[in-house]
Image (tube, helix red, strand yellow):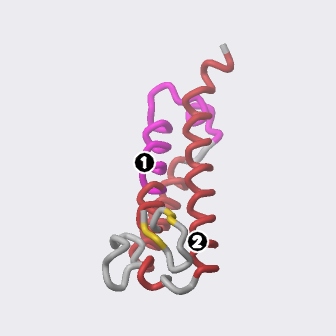
Amino acid sequence: MAETSRGTSEKPLYDIFADCLAYYRKLLLALNAENCLVVRLEKVDVGRILEEFGRVKTWGHQTKATLTSGARGSLDDTLKDCFELQKTIRSILHRLCWCLDQGRLFCEELPSLIC
């Protein structure tokens, strides 16, 4: 974990962003499962989720969140002295990860909740 100028050890934004992409992929895999009830009942639009995944990936490329924290010009490098903005982005990315994981869990557990 990277150590910020304030002396706290926190996960780099690069790693949190990579986690978000991984959670998106897991959710999409769950939605594409043959027995995914929310898709079969048309309660979720997989195409729209794919669009949002694309937007998140574009944001990552534009902000350079895809570059490792030590890389010059990376999001972590750019925000190294902007603690409040780091905190805000970190909070948003953590929340996105949590929401994506909740969606995946719901997709996987829904059939057992109905039976």
Identity, as a three-letter code, of the amino acid under mark 1: Arg
Label 1 secondary element = helix
N-terminal label among 1 and 2: 1
Q: Main secondary structure of the magenta part?
A: helix
- Residue 26 counted in the magenta span: yes
Residue sticking out furthest to the left: 71
Which stretch is magenta? 20-43
Measure the C-alpha gap from mark 1 to mark 2.
21 Å
For disc 1, the marked residue is 25
From the top left corner, tell me how far across and down residue 33 is, in percent.
45, 31
The relative height of residue 108 versus residue 74 in the rendered view (above or below) is: above
Residue at image location 60% in from the left, 21% down from the top: 111
In the rendered view, does 82 fall on the left or right side of 76? right
Residue at image location 37% in from the left, 73% down from the top: 69
For disc 2, the marked residue is 89
The quarter of the image holding the C terminus is top right
- Residue 84 counted in the magenta span: no
